[in-house]
Amino acid sequence: MSRPASSTAPQPQAEELSQDRTEHGIKMKELESTVARRAPETDDFANRKLIRPTLARPEANGGPGGGERRERPPKKNPPAEQTHAENFYYQKQMQSKTPMVIVLKDGEQVHGYIEWYDKHCIKVTRAGQSNLLIYKPSIKYMYKEGENGGQK
């Protein structure tokens, strides 16, 4: 008896194989222990369910675990160190030549308009008097001359 070449053909039973091979010197007991049998093909494979372990999920009502997990919004960049508001104010007062009153930390008042400024000082032009270069750290506050900024 010869074996069929097709894999779809049914395989011979163990008895047939044992008879076939006993002729070639193989004992029947050895054959029965080594013959692999094909599992019966049924439609059970299509109906199998995937088994997953049940995971403990935190309760949505604030139970253990802190409730639902939410995505964090992206981090905001810190505000800029320099807003340039001071520079804008000086530019505006210089262009309009607004008369200003600059009150120094020692209480002295300087009247004039701002002609020039930089990082550390401002230049004040005064009518009928010499111009002054005032260091910014020595300024207590300043206001427009027509306003009541100096009176408390």
Image (tube, grey):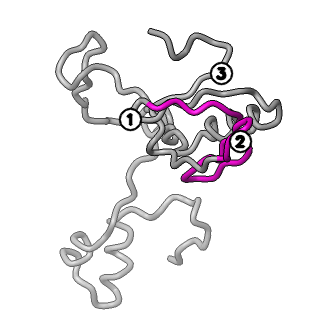
The image position of residue 68, as x and y in percent, is 34, 21
Residue 106: image tag: 1
Residue depth check, mark 3 versus mark 2: number of the one nearer the observer: 2
Q: Position of residue 30 (x, y in %)?
A: 21, 78
Q: Are marks 3 and 1 in contact (CB under 8 Å)?
A: no
Asked whether 19 or 4 is in front, the reply is 4
Task: Locate residue 119, reporting x and y percent.
Answer: 58, 53
- Report how far apart the C-alphas of labels 3 and 1 lie in the structure: 19 Å
Q: Secondary structure at mark 3?
A: strand
Tag shown at residue 125: 2
Q: Quadrant of residue 63?
A: top left
Helix, strand or loop status at disc 2:
strand
Q: Is residue 136 above or below residue 102?
A: below
Crowd rating for badge 1 (residues with CA inside 10 Å; few <14, some 14–19, many 20+): few
Residue type at the position of mark 3: Lys
What span is colored magenta in the figure? 108-131
Residue at x-position 61% and y-position 37%: 86
- In the picture, the disc for residue 144 is 3
Q: Nearer the viewer, residue 124 or 53?
A: 124
Of pointers 3 and 2, the one earlier in the residue sequence: 2
Compare marks 3 and 1 and give the one earlier in the sequence. 1
Q: Which mark is residue 31?
A: none
